[in-house]
Every structure is written in C-alpha cells, then in structure tokens.
Image: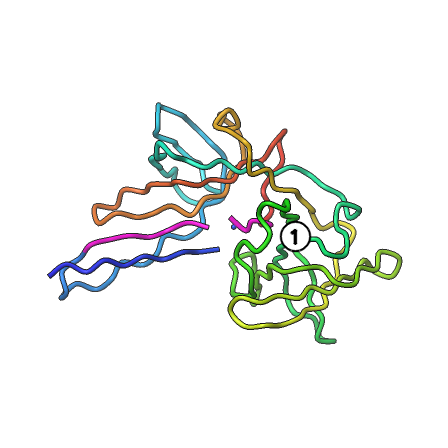
Amino acid sequence: MIYKRSLLAAVAGLSLLGGLAMCQPASAQPAPAPARIRGTIDKIDGNMLSVKPRSGADVMIKLTDDLKVVGVKKAQISDIQPGSFIGSATVPQPDGSEKALEVTVFPPSMKGSGEGSYGWDLGANSTMTNGTVGDLVVSNGRTMTVKYDGNGKGEKKIVVPDDVPIVLLNPEAGRSLLTVGAHIIVVPTKAADGTLTANRISVGENGTVPPM
C-alpha cells in the first residue's frame, strides 16, 4: 500500500513555503524533509538549476513550469509601519523580548502568509514570527510589537538592531531574476528517487542576499 505525505514549510518575510510529497511502502520509514537551501545559482540549463549552497556540495533542483519567483530587495526601517505584515527570524533575550536576525516586509497581497510563530534555522533557539506590527518605536532601540494568529494567538516584542537586514518581497518577480550568481532561498520537494523539485523560489534582486 502506498501512502502520500505532504509538508508545507514556511519563507520573509516570506518567509518563503515549499512542499514535500513522497510515496513509500507502508513498511518504509519516511525520508526526512529537505532543509531550506540557501546559496547562489551556479548554473542554469533549461528547467534545471545548479545551486551552490552556503555549505556543502552543489545541489541540482528541477524547476516546475508553473514556478513562482519572489523577488527580495533591500528595505529600510521606514518601510515598516504600524499595520505592516512582516516576518522576522529572532532569538530570545534575557528580558523576555526577541532580537531580530532579519525582518521581511510583505506586500499587502501577501498579508497573512505563514502567519504564526514557529521554529526556524538561522541559529540556536531561533524562531520565525509572521504577524502584524502594532506599536513601532524607532527612537528607542528600534522596537516593534508583532501580533500573530495562525498556530495560536500571540504577541512578541522584537528589537531590531541597526545592522539587521530588512527586505521587501516582490511577488510579481519573474524568471528573469534567475541568473548565475543570484542569491536564492528555496524549500524543494524531494521525490522518492531523491530528485529535488521546486515550484517556488525567492531570489535576491540587485545582489541582495535573502536573509531569512
């Protein structure tokens, strides 16, 4: 008997979401979900993308015909306003607040994407929180309050250091951003034969490195 499993992982801002689908005999152990791949495009051959990860060997990813390309471009703290929907990877601080490792600002059309707070892989004890900005204070340590729903309602006080990257997502970006040397982040689907496939990919614009 064949079972099918699917997994959605949250992407910025944009977090940035991918799926995992596989078919296996009932007696087989499920294969681990592929991790987020962060790196640069090394080679493009039709729908095949060779990616050089930040660590490890090159990875081949097959792009689907309906691939969605999300652009990632640099932004400023002024692009965040009360009511903005944002995503921020953070680590806890002793006073109960969270220190941002990055902040991704979503356009209105992506409001609600990946809403919630969940584990992330940018550092020990890091989490990703996607939610709506309430209060925002830029004159006292650049602190914002983020409220979220989704996997449980909550609120976080997030401190954004001056050197933390802030980016905007462009959901209307096209395949023209897929060029050798471009920085990407992708969560591919892994088939039973080990083939990686992606129907969504985030690409830095003008040399931007997606920080999420």
Query: Could you say which is closer to the camera, residue 19 or residue 98?
Result: 19
Among all residues in the image, which is located at the extreme right? 139
Residue 166 in percent (x, y) is at: 69, 46
Residue 44 in percent (x, y) is at: 40, 25
Q: Amino acid at mark 1?
A: Glu
Question: Which residue: 35% across, 35% down?
Answer: 64
**Residue 20 colored in magenta in the image:** yes
Apparent side of residue 36 relative to residue 130 in the rendered image (left or right): left
Q: Which residues are magenta?
A: 13-23
Q: Is residue 86 above or below residue 67?
A: below
Query: Could you say which is closer to the camera, residue 48 or residue 107?
Result: 107
Among all residues in the image, which is located at the extreme bottom? 95
Query: Could you say which is closer to the camera, residue 33 or residue 169?
Result: 169
Residue 68 in percent (x, y) is at: 45, 37
Apparent side of residue 112 relative to residue 133 in the rendered image (left or right): left
Among all residues in the image, which is located at the extreme front? 109
The quarter holding residue 73 reads: top right
Other-residue count near label 1 (Cα within 10 Å), few / some / many at <14 / 14–19 / ≥20: many
Tag 1 residue: 102
